Image: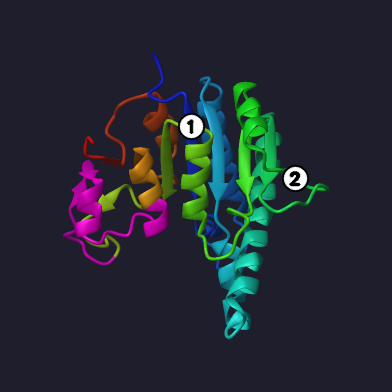
Amino acid sequence: MANNYKRILLKLSGEALLGKQGHGIDADILTLYADEIKKVQEQGVEVSIVIGGGNIFRGVKGATEGMDRVQGDYMGMLATMINSMALQDALERKNVHTRLMSAIRMEEIAEPYIRRRAIRHLEKGRVVIFGAGTGNPYFTTDTAASLRAIEIEADVILKGTRVDGIYDSDPEKNSDAVKFDTITGDDVLNRRLNVMDLTAFTLCRDNRTPIIVFDMNQPDNLRKVVCENEGIGTTVIWDQK
């Protein structure tokens, strides 16, 4: 069976790594993610990943109140590197070859991000993890995910969350929330649905990069999204130019 996508960018939230813990990284969630990523990589899909740092940085948020915004943003970038290194280790313990590339130079633990080198790693079947966001303050990891996906010409951005798609209201607060199977980008904006921040979303819209929001914590969902067509999650589609 042919895969739906040849090259993907998987966006994971740092908060998801908390699992049932109140802080840090839940080893069980890390193992689950590594297993799920390995499944699609073994199907011949080229996998790149951006992971947030909220599980670490949110934990020190109280200590950074009143701190310079730029300083705080760089701290957040370093938090993404901690998560990226943890995911890299989890993948390599499962014999999945990975490369960690950082937007901030730190040669002892990661390669500097170079677009052509990243594409070459993907073509060789390595999982590529992009750490440290865009390397610039004032930009989120959602924006980093959109930017990297466009640069490496990914077929789709898969946003793995703890919710199984996009709803017309918060399903964790409203039991009557209605899930969309597909939704246009304009509808997302008009309804003010919190899919990605506006900069990230605009990048995807301008480059017609599809977005699928799905529940990453449900075993086998990632493989179903990438390799099958079972209506998992919600697909954001763009109006034709």
Q: Nearer the viewer, residue 86 or 146?
A: 146
**Color style of the picture:** rainbow
Q: Where is residue 161 in the image (x, y as percent from the top left)?
A: 42, 51
Q: Which residue is drawn at 57% across and 30% down?
A: 38
Location of mark 1 (residue): 153
Q: Is mark 1 on a helix, strand or loop?
A: loop
Image coords of residue 31 (percent x, y)? 60, 43
Q: Give the residue displayed 65% in from the left and 66% down from the top.
A: 74
Q: Say above or below: 84 vs 221.
A: below
The N terminus lies in which quarter of the figure?
Answer: top left
Give above or below for 20 relative to 213. below
Between 207 and 22, the one nearer to me in the picture: 207
SS of the residue under disc 2: loop
Write down the residue under mark 2: 110
What are the residue bounds of the magenta stretch?
Answer: 173-201
- Going 27% across and 62% down the picture, which residue do you hit? 170
